[in-house]
Amino acid sequence: MKKHNKLVRDNIPEIIEKAGGKARFRILSEKEYNSELDRKLLEEVKEYQEDRNLEEMADILEVLYAICTAHGYTMEALEEKRRQKHQERGGFEKRLFLEMVEDDKEDKVGMVSDIKALKLWSGVPQEWREILLNNVFCSNCKLTSIVNYAVKIEKHGLILEGECAKCGKPVTRVVENE
């Protein structure tokens, strides 16, 4: 007998029985149910990270729907909240990775991208951005790629300031205005 001790979908008892198996189930208290839903969400996310397929995404969504219901929310309320946050804060389409925020209260170190510059940079077609990022001159390595870069606007265009992908020395890439 294999022990599972986990929350399962509602039709699992019938599926096990049809396959000729015998299983023992119990009904969870509300507190246990909420706790097991959280555990199930982590389990499904882990499975998605391993397989990265649509089936695992659907499992994550099913658990999220169950969590919403358990907390008295509807799927429509969840979708409305998602739309509202998307409207206010955007989605993840631009693939922005926040490295740091410069704050007057702290030392001014590191690289910060100008928001206007990031918008302009994200307007450059992806294939051109790849070409520009991988065609940078380094005084040490010659032709290289730029990594850990920040984007800012200068009068002649966009400036990418970052590090050489090979040696880590500072490099700059100018993207001139059209």
Image (cartoon, rainbow, N blue to C red):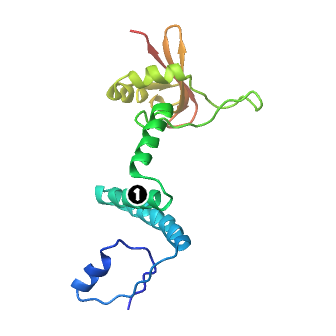
Q: Residue at x 72, y 28 (%)?
A: 108
* Left or right relative to 103: residue 98: left
Q: Quadrant of residue 7?
A: bottom left
Residue furthest to the front: 72
| Residue drawn at point x = 35 percent, y = 56 percent | 57
Report the label total: 1
- Of 43 and 19, nearer the camera is 19
| Closest to the observer, 121 or 163 | 121
**As rendered, which of 10 and 107 lies closer to the eye?**
10
Task: Please state, as top left, top right, bottom left or bottom right, where the C terminus lies in the image.
Answer: top left
Residue that label 1 marks: 65
Residue 82 in the image: state x and y as whole percent: 44, 42
Measured as percent of width and height from the top left, residue 98 is found at 56, 37
The x, y position of residue 111, in whole percent, is 61, 29
Location of residue 1 (image quadrant): bottom left
Q: Residues within 10 Å of mark 1 (few under 14, many from 20)?
A: some
Determine the image quadrant of residue 15: bottom left
From the viewer's perspective, is residue 49 above or below residue 102?
below
Residue 156 higher or lower than 113, as above or below: above
- Dot 1 amino acid type: Tyr
Q: Secondary structure at mark 1?
A: helix
Give the residue displayed 31% in from the left and 90% down from the top: 22
**Residue 91, percent from left and from top:** 44, 36
As displayed, is residue 27 above or below residue 109? below
